[in-house]
Image (cartoon, rainbow, N blue to C red):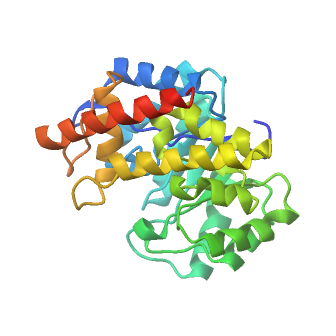
Amino acid sequence: MKLPLTGIVPPMITPLRARDELDVAGLERLIEHILAGGVNGLFILGTTGEGPSLSYRLRRELIERVCRQVNQRVPVLVGITDTAFVESVNVAHCATDAGANAVVLAPPYYLPEAQPELSEYLDHLVPELPLPLFIYNMPALTKVHFELETIRRALDNPRIIGFKDSSGDLNYFEQAVELIQQRPDWSVLIGPEEKLLASLQLGGSGGVSGGANLFPKLYVKVIEAHRAGDLDRAQTLQNQIQRISDSFYHIGKYSSSIIKGIKCALACQGICDDFMAEPFHRFRTEERDLVQARLKEIEAELSQLNL
């Protein structure tokens, strides 16, 4: 894997048919759909992939199927976040055996750690991992923030190669970008796609954008327009990303609507099933009809942009 990893690395949803069953045909279609958009990597078993809600058996099956189908066309990053140290290591070994390129870790999410404990956790875990590590800042779900001093300490470990920030705090993101200049092989990727262009303008490496499950080429083109210095084009495309967020991620009042919206739209596109890992359920008929109508609008708008 060429370092630093830059560009768009979609956090792939996990297509399911039932509580502990993959939608295998849908998974195969989804992988090819995403890769056809020209993305720079694939991240599985993250938040959008409902990773912590899946059985270890199903996680292993997903890792093996994804790595086999991708076949090194792009780097595959595997989420290993867990409350149990040993299980994170076990999933990392499965990822290695399957041919993945790196693993991704957020802080253990049940008992919150102090920063010295989090640093020590990384010191103990990284030597046990057979693959390089991206650290993942997701304080809304883990209750723990990777403070800048903890990131600074992580820079001293050559086995840690990047950072994904889903805090949504651009001031924090900018400080992290400045801090990481001492490690030119490090990636600094942003999670919230609504801030993708802003993060690039601050020196970020790219995005782990959920909407790239649906329209991967759009997100790739934002990166390309930014790199080319075409600010008007980049902003036009970023506005379209905001439209996707407004259209699909805020249906209903629950935070699960983000993943539900992406899965439902993919089902409406005929790509994969939209079954959700429990305790969540797919959108009902009323919400699904709304997604279908908005999807047609978005597709028409993207067609006008030659996407």
* Horizontal relation, residue 65 to residue 272: left or right: right
Between 86 and 190, which is closer to the camera in this rendering? 190
Report x, y in % for residue 33: 49, 23
Report x, y in % for residue 275: 24, 36
Q: Can you say whether 16 is above or below 141 in the image?
A: above
* Residue projecting furthest to the left: 285
Between 151 and 262, which is closer to the camera in this rendering? 262
Q: Residue at the location (51% across, 66% down)?
A: 107
Q: Can you say whether 15 is above or below 25 in the image?
A: below
Q: Residue at the location (75% across, 44% down)?
A: 230
* Horizontal relation, residue 75 to residue 66: left or right: right
Q: Where does the C terminus fall, quadrant-wise? A: top right
Q: Where does the N terminus fall, quadrant-wise? A: top right
* Horizontal relation, residue 168 to residue 268: left or right: right
Report x, y in % for residue 169: 57, 72
Is any atom of residue 163 visible in this view? no
Count of numbered tags: 0
Report x, y in % for residue 50: 37, 47
Q: Residue at the location (72% across, 74% down)?
A: 175
Q: Can you say whether 24 is above or below 160 in the image?
A: above
